[in-house]
Amino acid sequence: MPPTNTTPTKTESITHKQPSIHEAPQTLGVLDSIIQTVEQRISPVWPLKDYVAVNPYAGFAKQEFLATREYLRTLSDLEFFMPVDYYRQQFAAGELDRNDISAAVDELVADRVEGAERIDVNQVVTLLRQASTPSPTADAEFTHPANDNRTLFTLAEIIDADTDSDWCRSITSEISKQCASHYDDGQATWCSTSRDLPLFTAWRSEKLRDRTFEILGVSSFRKFVSALPHDGRAALSWLMNQLGLPTELWEDYLLCSALKMPGWSAWTRYQQREANHAGIENDDFIGLIAIRMAYEVAISKHLNFHVAWPSFANKHLKNRERAAHPSNHDLLRYALLKASEIAYRNRLLGDLGGQKSASLGEGSVDGQTSLDHSAESSPPLAQMVFCIDVRSERLRRHLEATSSAIETFGFAGFFGIPMEFVELGTNQGSPNVPALIQPQFRVHEEIDTVDTDQNSSFATKRLNLRFMRKAWKEFQSSAISMFAFVETTGLLCGWKLLARSLGWKPSLQHRFDGVAKEHRCELSPSIDNLPERGVTFEKQVDLAESILRGIGILHDFGRLVVFCGHGSEVQNNPLQAGLDCGACGGHSGEPNARFAAKLLNQPHIRQSLVQRGIEIPDDTQFVAALHNTTTDEISFFDDHLLPSSHFGDRQQLQSLATDATQRTRMERCRLLPGPDTNDVVRRSGDWSEVRPEWGLAGNAAFIAAPRQFTQSVSLDGRSFLHSYDYRNDRDFAVLEQIMTAPMVVANWINMQYYASTVDPIHFGSGNKTVHNVVGGFGILSGNGGDLMSGLPWQSVHDGKHYQHHPLRLLAVLAAPRDAITSVLEKHPNVAELISNGWIHLVAAKGHRFYRYTEQNTWEETTHNPTHPTAV
C-alpha cells in the first residue's frame, strides 16, 4: 500500500467524469513514441539456462546517477542507497573516516552535483552519530522507509489505498500465472493452446473463458475483456483513453506500471530483444502493460471508482521539478556512498602505487614497463590465461606464488571466440558469447578420435537416452500415474534422497549421455569444416591474431599456453548459470578454451601468423583447462593431443596447480567458514547448501594493465583483471575493445550486485529456500508474485553481515589519458556511463593516478596506501 502521507485522499481522487468507451485514442503517434522510450528504460532478464548479470539501471545511463534516483522515487519505491546504519557501522569500525567524507563532499561539488554545495562533512558526521537502527539479517526483514517523495501511483495502488483492499497483489498473481503458462519452456505437462499468439492476444483469448476475476468480485469481467481490441498496442491506447490520463502523465504512468512488476517487464523485454535479433516484431512488453491496465480499468469500473487525474498531474509535475533539486538528506546519503567509494579507491590505488616493484616505474614509456623477458632468460613453463572474473584473482595470485615459471593473464572468458556451441546429438546450441554480442558461427561437438559414423552412433544413443529420461519424468508427474509412482517406488527414492543428503552426488553427468567412458575426455568442440560454417581460413587467422593481441602474448611464449575457462559445480540451484562464465553467456568456458587451443595449435594458422608479426615457437603448445570456481580445482583437457615431449611439463603444471588450489581454498575459508578446506569441496555437492560459493560478491574494480601492476598485491578477489600493455596496442584498438566490451560487462555485473544489495525488494530474488522454478525459464519466490530477476539474499549476505559491499565500479586503466579520452569521444554510450556517475574511471601513469571527472576533465587523485584493500 502506498504511504498514507502521499496517497491522495478519497475526495481528491474521485471525480464523476469518465471518458466514453467509444472515445477515440489521443495522438497515437505520441503514444507510440512514449512507449518506445519506456521500453528502453527496462533492462531485459535472461532465462535460467543462459542467465547472465544485467545492469537493471542501464536504461537510465543518459541521466546522472542521483538525478535518476530522485526521478524514480517520484513514481516508484525503488531505492539506490544503503540504509544509513550500514555506513554508520563502517564509520564506527574505521573503514570509513572523516577524510573520506570530506573528499566525497569536495568531489560532489567539483562534479557539479545539484545542491552539493549545501552540505559539508560536519552534517554527514552528525547523521552518522544519530541513534542506530538494526540492520536486516534476512531478506524478509529488509524494508524501505516510507517514500515521502512519491506522487504518482498506479490505479490499483490508488484503489487499494482508498478502499483498504489488495487488488495489486491479485493483479500480479493473475499476470504471473498468465506469463508462466504463455512462456513455458517444457516444464508444464499441459501447455497453453495460445502460446503461439502474442502475449496480450493470448491473454484476451483465455480470459474470455476464465472466471477467476469474477470469483474475486469483479462481475462482468469477461464482458469487459470482450470489448477490448485484439492487439496489445491498440488495447493499450484504448485503455489509456479510458483512464483519462493527461498526456503529460503518459510516460511516467507507463513506467510506473512497468516498475510495479519489474521481473515480468524485464522478461518481456528479453522476448522483444530476441525477436528483434531474429527480425521479428514483438510487442509483448506493450501487451504486458496493457494487461495490467485492463485489470485496473475493469476494477475501477466495477467499483465506479474514478480518479481526478488532472489533480494528480499538477502535483506530480511540481514534484518532478522538486526532484531536480535533491533534499539535503538525500545529498548526505549520496555523500556516504561516495565516501565509501573513495575509501576503497584510496586503499586500492595506495596499494597499487606503493608497490616496491617497478610495475609503473621510472624509465618506462608513460609509466609502463615491458612484459618482455630478457634474452638470457628461459621461457616460462606456462602462461595461463584466465577470465577477468574476480574469482580468478585469488587463484592467479597463488599460482604465481607456487612458481616463478608460471605467468598469468586476464582476458574475456570466451577467449574472443564468438560461437554458438552445439552439443553432440542436438540441433540447437547455446550462445557462448557475452550478452552484448551475437554468435557469428556454429561449432559442433564431436569425439575427435572416431569417425563420422561412430559420432553419429553416439549421438543416436544420446537422443534415445534423453528421450527415455524425459518419458520417465513425464510418467512421474502425469495426472494419472504420479500417485501410483510414489506408492510403488517411494522407498527406492527414499534411499536416493538419503544418499544425496549425506553428500553423495551423481558421478555421471548428463553432458556425457550416450558416450562411452573411454571416449568422454575426447568429447570436444570440432574445428573441422569451419569454412563450411562461414569461417574462412583468413577469418581463422584473424581470430587467432585477435586472441593473442587481446591477451598481449605476442612473443616470449612459454612451453605451455593455457586457456583456462571457468564454470561452477553446484547442486539444486536454478541460478547456477549466474555462477558460470558471463562472457560465455552464462555457460561454462570449457568449449571456448578448447576451441581456442585447437585453433592455435594448427600449423597453417601459425605459419600465417608469422606474416602478421607473431612467431610462435615450435615447442609451444596451447592447452585448454577449466577453473571450477566452487572448488578452485583446475582440470586440463585433451591430453591425447599433447605431444609426448610436453608430458613432463603438463604433469609439473598439474602439481603446481594442485598446490595453488589448496592455498586458494584456505584463503576462501575465511569467507565460507568450515572446519577445513574439505568443506569447500563439500559445498559443491550439498544440495541443501544455499551458499556453495560467493560468486562475484565483493566486486568493486576493473583493472586493465600489465600483470606487474597488480602482481604483488592481494586484491581479495574484488577486481576484474584484464591484461593490457598499451605499447603493443596499434592505434589503441585493443584499448577501445576493452573499454567498450569487458569494462561494460563488468559494469553490468557490478550494477546487478549493487541493485540486488541496495534494493532486494525490487531487484533481488528473495530467499533461495523458497525458490520455485517457473516455466523452466525463471524463478518465483514462493508460489506466486512477480518474476524474480536479481540475486538471492544468500548471494550478498551471510546471515550476519553483508558479503557484497555496494560500490559503483572503479575502472583503472594503465593507458595514456589522451587515448582514453579519444575512445570516450568515439563511444558516447560508454562516456555517459562515466560522466553520469555509473562508473568511476582512473588513468594510471607511473605511481600517479588521474580521475576522470563527471565534467569530462582529468584531475590527479591522492590516495592513502596504509589501509588494507578489503572493505
Image (cartoon, rainbow, N blue to C red):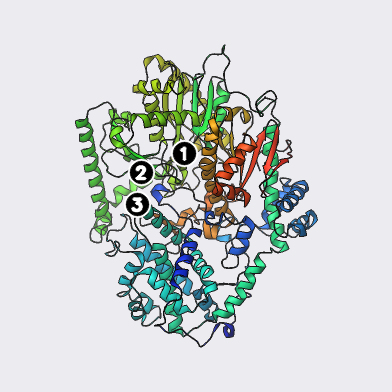
Return the residue found at the far top.
376
Asked where in the image residue 196 lies, by quadrant, the reply is bottom left
- Name the residue tied to disc 2: 430
User: How far apart are labels 2 and 1 at the CA level?
Assistant: 29 Å
Mark 1 lies on a secondary structure that is helix
Comes first in the chain, label 2 or label 1 = 2
User: How far apart are labels 1 and 3 at the CA level?
Assistant: 43 Å
- Amino acid type for the residue under numbered disc 1: Arg
Determine the residue positioned at 58% across, 44% down: 824
**Other-residue count near label 2 (Cα within 10 Å), few / some / many at <14 / 14–19 / ≥20:** some
Foreground: disc 2 or disc 1: 2
Tell me: residue 865, above or below residue 96: above
User: How far apart are labels 3 and 2 at the CA level?
Assistant: 15 Å
Mark 2 lies on a secondary structure that is strand
Mark 3 lies on a secondary structure that is loop
Return the residue found at the far right.
122
Foreground: disc 3 or disc 2: 3
Determine the residue positioned at 40% across, 78% down: 216
- Name the residue tied to disc 3: 278
Q: Is residue 65 left or right of residue 118?
A: left
The numbered mark at residue 682 is 1
Question: x, y (%) of residue 721?
Answer: 56, 35
Q: Is residue 243 left or right of residue 698?
A: left
Tell me: residue 198, above or below residue 3: above
Q: Specify whether residue 694 is in view.
A: no
Question: x, y (%) of residue 485?
Answer: 25, 55
Comes first in the chain, label 3 or label 2 = 3
Q: Is residue 2 left or right of residue 479?
A: right
Foreground: disc 1 or disc 3: 3
Comes first in the chain, label 1 or label 3 = 3
Are dots 1 and 3 in contact, CB under 8 Å?
no
